[in-house]
Image: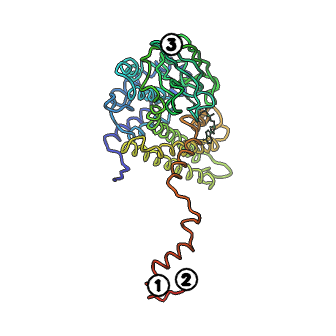
Amino acid sequence: MSWNFSTDPEFEAKLAWMRDFVKEEVYPLETLPLDYKQFREIIKPLQDQVREQGLWAAHLGPDHGGQGYGQVKLGLMHEILGASELAPPVFGVHAPDTGNSELIAIGGTEEQKERYMEPLLANEIWSAYSMTEQGTGSDPTQFTTSAVLDGDEWVVNGTKFCVGNADRSDIHILMCVTDPDADRHSRASMLIIPTDVPGIETREIALMSDPEGKGVLHTHCEVIYTDVRVPKDALLGERGKGFELAQKRLGPGRIHHCMRWIGVSRRAFDMLCERAVSKSVHGGLLSDKQMIQQWVADSIAAIESMRLLTLNAAWKIDQVGASNARQEIAMIKYAGAPAMHDVLDRAIQIHGALGFSGDMPLEHMYRWARASRLYDGPDEVHKVAVAKRILRGYEPHDLPSEHVPTRRAAALEKYAEQLERLGVLHVA
Ligand SMILES: Cc1cc2nc3c(=O)[nH]c(=O)nc-3n(C[C@H](O)[C@H](O)[C@H](O)COP(=O)(O)OP(=O)(O)OC[C@H]3O[C@@H](n4cnc5c(N)ncnc54)[C@H](O)[C@@H]3O)c2cc1C
């Protein structure tokens, strides 16, 4: 096993280009009152520049038309893109289209790839991932949305909750129960539902991050499917293997989420430090106050820890695949989300009322960051999974295996001869 914490110079040059490009071209867009259609239009020339650099839709492997960077390099790219909520669509790696195109790449037929994946990658169509039902996100085996075969068609009925872009997308990838009598992990399948079929109703939900539901990038919706009919070949992947397919999507996706959170944290950290060296109170700069120095020290340690943990998980995926890196992937979720929260919180605090106001980007970043402890499975679920996995490796002992008197008795026996020779006869 070798360890290498450096990036090859050729790729580092691409990252440097991305850093400048995001700062110069994307950050200014954050300040403009664009709706999502205007936004999609204004970024087209920027998307062309990204394509020219060979950095467009970099999430897919070479067998699916991507560059095959692997998760470590993709992670480093997402760290840069995460700094601005508006950057991922400029690079063709915005959720949920990335995950959805990956799903079709992994599980789709050639016809599905041509019909949906290619246009998704070209940014010609938009998609939604329709899985959660209210109160069941932590335990998807409780889903009730069903698809029943009627001749050559699936008939879908049910309600989903908090589905990103459900009202703006051309297709939904829907998780639904197709085999209610199978064991609880084999009941669900995925279907690709074009949104122009009759029977789909969406209700936009205001979120903490977007209380007015303007959603330049995302809206979130409740979606009601009533007798929605799609052809039998709308099935994505194998019947009854919906959860398995979902797992394949989540591993690499989580690396990208966490690296984006590091980008958010780093940007907030820069604001924190800039303010610290700019503002004087009670006769001295904030940067001279020990409490502020502690925030700086704690924040950078948290960011660097989160970064190493996440890159290690990415490295492990690259080495042994996502299913063998489950523990690492789960850990970054619940370690990363609170770390980002705390850095943002300190950055707001040091700016006082200005930080809490819309005159700084921090309050929006903070509201959006709160969701990170929920989406992709709440932190608690990942903690439980990691703890269970770890605890499986331990045996019960009546007396702790480190119990000193018991170990001493064993050691006395083991070294009896030498102890006698050395004259160590009485050990208390
Ligand atoms: C911004 C945002 C975007 C989203 N986008 C999408 C999307 O595009 N498509 C989609 O399908 N869904 C989406 N979701 C939904 C998301 O996936 C779910 O919110 C998440 O999986 C949790 O499910 P739930 O909301 O039903 O919570 P519940 O399952 O009701 O869980 C509620 C709480 O119970 C606690 N809990 C659960 N299990 C345990 C346990 N084992 N031990 C201890 N405590 C536990 C946790 O605190 C948890 O937060 C989005 C959510 C947000 C916030």
Q: Where is residue 387 in the image (x, y as percent from the top left)?
A: 55, 49
Answer with mark 3 or mark 2, whichever residue precedes in sequence.
3
Answer with mark 3 or mark 1, whichever residue precedes in sequence.
3
Amino acid on which disc 3 is placed: Arg
On residue 106, which mark appears?
none
Q: Name the residue under label 1.
A: 419
Spatial separation of the CA atoms under disc 3 and disc 1? 83 Å
Amino acid on which disc 2 is placed: Val
Front-lying residue, 279 or 84:
84
Label 3 SS: strand
Front-lying residue, 189 or 355:
189
For residue 314, side relative to residue 389 (left or right): left
For the C terminus, the image quarter is: bottom right
Q: Where is residue 389 in the image (x, y as percent from the top left)?
A: 51, 48
In which quadrant of this rendering is ligand 1 seen?
top right
On residue 229, which mark appears?
3
Answer with mark 2 or mark 1, whichever residue precedes in sequence.
1
Check contact, mark 2 vs mark 1: CB within 8 A: yes
Q: Mark 2 points at which residue?
A: 427
Q: Position of residue 26 (x, y in %)?
A: 47, 29
Label 1 SS: helix
Front-lying residue, 143 or 209:
143
At x 45%, y 38%, the residue is 251
Front-lying residue, 389 or 3:
389
Q: Where is residue 221 in the image (x, y as percent from the top left)?
A: 59, 22
At x 54%, y 10%, the residue is 198
| Total numbered labels placed on residues in the image | 3
Is residue 399 positioned above or below 114 on the image?
below
